[in-house]
Image: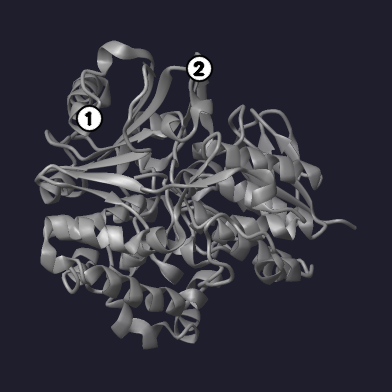
């Protein structure tokens, strides 16, 4: 009899899992709370403007290409991708800028304009992190279900190279003296919702990935990727039920056997949870069934920052880069405001996406779709968004002018704002922490919720709340890990998941073939998420 699997959530992790499971001959049904697929990787469309809701950077496409390969297609066939050069512009509140490019000579010249002594450090940084990334390969392709896995993965032998107790910023001092140059290679820790002054040094690989493998824009935005995943899943026979919130996961003893929604009851041989981890546990699983991840323990965990978002449909176009990142003059204070004091900074860092300079399909002719993001604290009593939203919005418009956009507000024809309170209440993200559980040393590898969920039987996790962590490439890798475990537990061959790594024949634009497979898994956005 054909096995049946329920996937809760049609985000990128749920869609990737559905593709891999359906490719193995399993009957898959996705149950999604919202009326659209994609979760945080969906889009906002209004008045002819189109915006990505969450992730706007697409890194290391090979992971998704290999998942498509398991389904008999390729990323190139499904989505048009453009590699960006410059990847992004970094503007420093302390003065100076970098148009970050994969062209090594040009990048060295730009670094030298900020600090001549730092220019030679760029090649040394690339060489060392190339070795570090290769050494991390086994950790990113395999589940971590306990201490035994930690030892077997040779991680202990790698500790001298990984420098786990050193921050990314501390590690970068070996290559760069100028604080601004170091920030250019460690602001990526915000992809994980963390400060580079606290984020473990192994995440220096984040910026290396961008220079080695590129920053891509999918035509139509990152939401075009999840729409392509939906098409592939449906071709494989996956049933997708939209606008059907799951109200509880059904159990026989401690084994998940299906879900109940307001509309129906769906039985299954296993359940894959792609919803926000902490919120799903609170809402869908009785507390008494959980041992390691009770409500009390969830409340005591460390969570990432959140984001304040502005989606602006604007009259006119801008001769500015696709991505601009403005780093506050006192970046350390800005991060302290976010992570420790939980207050809104008067001088925030922020990010502006001007995607129409690359992709005119996102706005009517002669107009622009601008995406603005400022990292802020997750939900905390110190910030009342019903009171503070208007003030921070006005501050954001003032700051955008510093990125070269001038007096933008009077040109706005469409506007939508999303605060951490919205992420929490509308999008069901625990505390509005858009990057999930923080990626601290005590919440990584086997100390993160396991892909085969350790508290219950027949339940598997995918997404930013499980191993390897947050970001689109990492979420795709979590789907491979979890799907492989699920199929093995059901006695179904899972060889197609791994064979796609070597058989995927479509070379992606400007990408080097073969190497590292899932390496970006642990370190991607955007997810994301963007910044």
Q: Where residue 228 appears, x then y in whole percent?
A: 66, 41
Mark sitting earlier along the chain (1/2): 2
Q: Is residue 69 left or right of residue 361?
A: right
Residue 370's image quarter?
A: top left
Q: Residues within 10 Å of mark 2 (few under 14, many from 20)?
A: few
Question: In the rendered image, which residue does mark 1 sit on?
Answer: 404
Mark 2 element type:
strand
CA–CA distance between discs 1 and 2? Answer: 25 Å
Identified at 37% across, 56% down, the residue is 297
Closer to viewer: mark 1 or mark 2:
1
Which residue is outermost to the right?
1
Q: Is residue 70 left or right of residue 393?
A: right
Q: Quadrant of the C terminus?
A: top left
Question: In the rendered image, which residue does mark 2 sit on?
Answer: 46
Mark 1 element type:
loop
Q: Quadrant of the N terminus?
A: bottom right
Residue 271, label in figure: none
Q: Nearer the viewer, residue 363 or 204?
A: 363
Q: In the rendered structure, are the residues bearing label 1 and label 2 in contact, judged by CB atoms less than 8 Å apart?
A: no
Q: Where residue 147 appears, x then y in whole percent?
A: 45, 80
Check the image and report above or below for 508 versus 381: below
Q: Is residue 256 visible?
A: no
Q: Nearer the viewer, residue 463 or 291?
A: 463
Q: How is the image coloured?
A: one colour
Q: Nearer the viewer, residue 322 or 42?
A: 322
Identified at 34% across, 38% down, the residue is 321
Q: Where residue 149 appears, x then y in whole percent?
A: 50, 80
Q: Where residue 103 appears, x then y in whole percent?
A: 36, 59
Q: Is residue 295 left or right of residue 331?
A: right
């Amino acid at each position: 009899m054909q096995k049946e699997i329920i996937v809760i959530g049609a985000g990128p992790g749920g869609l990737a899992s559905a593709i891999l499971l359906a490719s193995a001959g399993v009957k898959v049904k996705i149950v999604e709370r919202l009326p659209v697929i994609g979760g945080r990787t969906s889009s906002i469309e209004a008045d002819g403007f189109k915006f990505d809701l969450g992730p706007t950077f697409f890194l290391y496409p090979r992971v998704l290409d290999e998942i498509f390969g398991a389904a008999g297609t390729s990323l190139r066939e499904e989505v048009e991708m453009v590699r960006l050069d410059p990847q992004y512009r970094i503007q420093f509140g302390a003065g100076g800028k970098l148009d970050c490019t994969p062209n090594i000579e040009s990048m060295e010249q730009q670094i030298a304009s900020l600090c001549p002594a730092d220019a030679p450090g760029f090649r040394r940084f690339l060489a060392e992190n190339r070795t570090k990334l290769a050494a991390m390969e086994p950790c990113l392709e395999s589940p971590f279900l306990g201490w035994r896995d930690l030892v077997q993965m040779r991680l202990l032998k790698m500790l001298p190279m990984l420098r786990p107790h050193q921050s990314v910023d501390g590690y970068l001092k070996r290559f760069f003296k100028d604080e601004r140059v170091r920030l250019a290679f460690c602001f990526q820790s915000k992809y994980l919702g963390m400060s580079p002054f606290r984020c473990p040094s192994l995440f220096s690989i984040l910026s290396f990935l961008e220079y080695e493998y590129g920053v891509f824009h999918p035509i139509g935005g990152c939401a075009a990727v999840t729409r392509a995943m939906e098409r592939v899943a449906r071709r494989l026979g996956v049933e997708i039920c939209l606008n059907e919130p799951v109200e509880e996961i059904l159990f026989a003893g401690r084994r998940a056997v299906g879900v109940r929604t307001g509309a129906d009851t769906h039985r299954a041989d296993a359940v894959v949870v792609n919803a926000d981890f902490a919120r799903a546990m609170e809402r869908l699983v009785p507390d008494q069934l959980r041992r390691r991840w009770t409500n009390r323990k969830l409340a005591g965990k460390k969570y990432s920052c959140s984001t304040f978002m502005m989606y602006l449909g604007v009259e006119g176009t801008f001769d500015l880069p696709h991505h601009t990142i403005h780093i506050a003059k006192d970046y350390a204070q800005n991060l302290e405001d976010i992570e420790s004091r939980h207050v809104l900074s008067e001088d925030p860092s922020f990010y502006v996406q001007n995607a129409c300079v690359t992709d005119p399909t996102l706005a009517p002719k002669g107009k622009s779709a601008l995406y603005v993001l400022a990292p802020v604290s997750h939900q905390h009593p110190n910030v009342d968004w019903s009171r503070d939203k208007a003030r921070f919005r006005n501050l954001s418009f003032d700051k955008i002018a510093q990125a070269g956009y001038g007096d933008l507000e009077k040109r706005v024809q469409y506007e939508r704002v999303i605060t951490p309170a919205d992420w929490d209440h509308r999008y069901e993200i625990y505390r509005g922490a858009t990057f999930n559980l923080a990626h601290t040393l005590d919440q990584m590898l086997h100390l993160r919720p396991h892909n085969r969920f350790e508290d219950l039987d027949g339940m598997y996790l995918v997404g930013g709340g499980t191993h390897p962590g947050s970001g689109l490439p990492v979420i795709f890798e979590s789907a491979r890990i979890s799907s492989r475990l699920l199929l093995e537990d059901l006695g179904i061959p899972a060889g197609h998941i791994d064979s796609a790594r070597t058989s995927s024949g479509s070379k992606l634009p400007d990408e080097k073939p073969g190497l590292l497979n899932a390496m970006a898994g642990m370190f991607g956005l955007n997810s994301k998420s963007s910044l």
